[in-house]
Image (spheres, grey):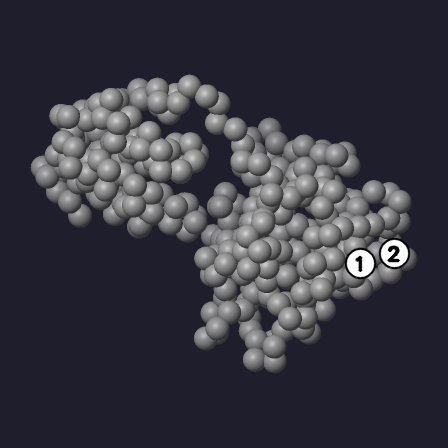
Amino acid sequence: MTKAAQLRNVAQVVTWWCGRLEANRSVSASYRATMLSLARRQVVPRLGKVTLKQLDRATVDDQLVWPMQAEGLSPHTAHKALQVLLMALELAAVQKRIDRNPLAGVSFKDFWSGKLQPKAAGLLPVAVPTLLANLCEAFEQQPVAVMLALTMLAQGNRIGESCQARRAQISMIERVWIFPSQNTKTREELVVPLTEQMCALLTRYWQALPPSRQGSPWVFPGVNGRPVSAKQASALIKELSGGEWTSHDLRKLARTVWAEIGIDYLVGEMLLNHSVGTLAKTYIRTTADQLRREALERWHAWLDARGFTAAHGLKSEQTGISTNAA
C-alpha cells in the first residue's frame, strides 16, 4: 500500500484507493471490476502525474472529462471516472492521508450542463415475441446462454447473482429460488417465488445440459467444475443477441412491462432486488411473498401469450393461470 507521506499526486491517491477497493467485500464483484478498470484505464493515465497542488476543476475538465467524450466515450462513462477520482480524494482526506481534498464540493454538473439521460433500452415490449422465438430456437444448442437470458427476463435477476447460483438453492417442492445475501448486490437474501412455468423450464434446462455438466452443483456450469463467471456470461449473452441487447436490457424490459400490466412499483423493486427503505421493509415482511408470486404469475402469463410456452412446454391449464389475465 502507498504510504500516506507519498500521496502527493493523483496516481498515488487513486492507486491507494484501488488497493482498498480490491479488498472490499461489501461491494459486488462487478462494481469493483468497473471502478478499478476506470481508475487504471482512464483516471491514472490522464491525471496520474498531476500533483494535488495542481489539481483543480480546469485540470480535470481539460485532461479527463472532455477528452474522454472527444474520444467517443459516453457522458455516463466520464461521470463514473470522475466518481472514482472524487471518492479516492474524499477518503484520503477523511483519513488525513492528504492535507486537503482539492476537489471538495466538485460534481459532474461542474463539467456537464446537460442532463444525463438513461441509456436507451435495447429491447422494447413489441420485440418480445421475436425475442422468445429466437431464444427457443437456440435452446438445445446453447442451453446455458439461453437459460441465463430467460432467467433474467422471467425473474429480473442480475447476471452476477445468477452466475453464482447453486442448484441446492432451488426448491421445486417449496417453489422458491434463494439467492444468499453474500451473492446479492444489496447484501440481503433474495427469495424468488418459482411459478409453474419456471419449474418446468428449469427441468427442461437441466435435461438439455451436456452430460458432462448435468451433475454440476451450479445452476449455470462452466468448465473445470466452476460456474460461468459474470464476464463469461456477458460474452454468452452478447453472442446470443448478436450485440443487439445486453443482460441488463432484459431486466429493463421486464421492469417496463411490469409497470404496464399494473404490478405495484414496490413489488417490482423487490423482484429486481433493489434497496428499499425501512417503511418498505415492514410492508415486505408481512405481504411480500404472496405479492411477488402473484406478480410473477401475471408476468409469466403475459410472456406465455407471446411465446414463452415454447420454452417451458406447459399448456395453459397446467400453469393454473389464463393467459387472458395478462
Left or right side of 76 for 1? left
Q: Is residue 213 left or right of residue 253?
A: left
Labels 1 & 2 near each other (Cβ < 8 A): yes
Q: Quadrant of the C terminus?
A: top right
In the figure, residue 254 lies in which quadrant? top right
Residue 41's place in the image compared with 107, above or below, is below
Q: Is residue 291 above or below residue 183?
A: above
Three-letter amino acid code of the residue under disc 2: Ser
| Residue 6: quarter of image | top left
Mark 1: which amino acid? Thr
Label 1 to label 2: alpha-carbon separation: 8 Å
Residue 9 locus on image (x, y percent): 15, 35
Question: Left or right of 306: which side holds 96?
Answer: left
Give residue 324's position: percent from left, percent from top. Answer: 89, 45
Q: Secondary structure at mark 2?
A: helix
Q: Which residue is mark 1?
A: 309
Q: Which quarter of the figure has residue 280?
A: top right
Residue at 71% in and 64% down: 137
Badge 1 element: helix
Query: x and y percent of residue 125 in the render?
Result: 72, 42
Point 15% across, 37% down: residue: 49
Specify whether residue 178 is in view.
no
Q: Observer-nearest residue: 83 or 244?
A: 244
Q: Residue at x 79, y 46 (%)?
A: 302
Mark 1: few/some/many CA within 10 Å (<14, 14-19, 20+)? many
Q: Identify the residue position indicated by label 2 in the image.
A: 316
In the displayed structure image, the side of residue 71 where residue 201 appears, left or right: right
